[in-house]
Image: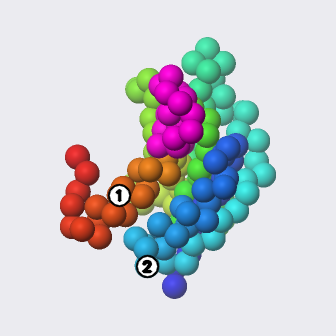
Amino acid sequence: MSELNLVCFDFEECYLNPQLKSHLCELLPTEIKIHEGKNNLSQYYHKERQQYDAGKIIEAFDTRKEQNKMILITSVDLYIPIFTYVFGLARLNGRTGIVSAHRLRSDFYGLSDDIVLFALLGKNQTRNDSEGKTNT
């Protein structure tokens, strides 16, 4: 059986990890392991944009000897040079992807911070999948 590693870097919503794992286990036929990232992402920070370069981050992780697929989860704001921001990034045939909850937080949009959109999206997607609906 293949394995998917979820690696959390600067992920403030770490209390969601068990829920996230549960949702992914329902959707993917693979063993899922959650790890706390120990690397410092500061080398990928662009001072003028005040964001982190998603492409450079996944490049760095794709060159590792680790053979299993890996999804990096973070709360930092991500970008790639051709876009103002991205919610996440992966490359075709790559082993690593990254997703950020930064712009999925309600307080980012000036709303009450008691709602974590990241959690709600996962719940709604799972419910819609089981009902045969798709989100557009």
The vertical placement of 95 against 2, above or below, is above
Q: Position of residue 34 (x, y in %)?
A: 65, 65
The mark lying in front, picked from 2 and 1, is 1
Foreground of the two, 81 or 77: 77
Q: Secondary structure at mark 2?
A: loop
Foreground of the two, 47 or 129: 129
Give the residue displayed 49% in from the left and 78% down from the top.
30
Give the residue displayed 52% in from the left and 70% down from the top.
22
Please identify the residue farthest to the top as the structure is shown: 48
Number of on-image labels:
2
- Does the magenta-highlighted stretch encompass residue 110? yes
Q: Is residue 70 visible?
A: no
Which residue is labeled 1 in the image?
125
Give the colour scheme shown: rainbow
Q: Position of residue 79 (x, y in %)?
A: 50, 31
- Does the magenta-highlighted stretch encompass residue 64? no
Q: Is residue 98 visible?
A: yes
The vertical placement of 101 against 128, above or below, is above
Bounds of the magenta span? 100-117
Left or right: 42, with 98 as reference point:
right
Q: Position of residue 78 (x, y in %)?
A: 54, 34
Mark 2 Cα-neighbour bin, 10 Å: few <14, some 14–19, many ≥20: few
Give the residue displayed 61% in from the left and 45% down from the top.
74
Q: Position of residue 86 (x, y in %)?
A: 45, 35
Disc number at residue 29? 2
Please identify the residue farthest to the bottom as the structure is shown: 1
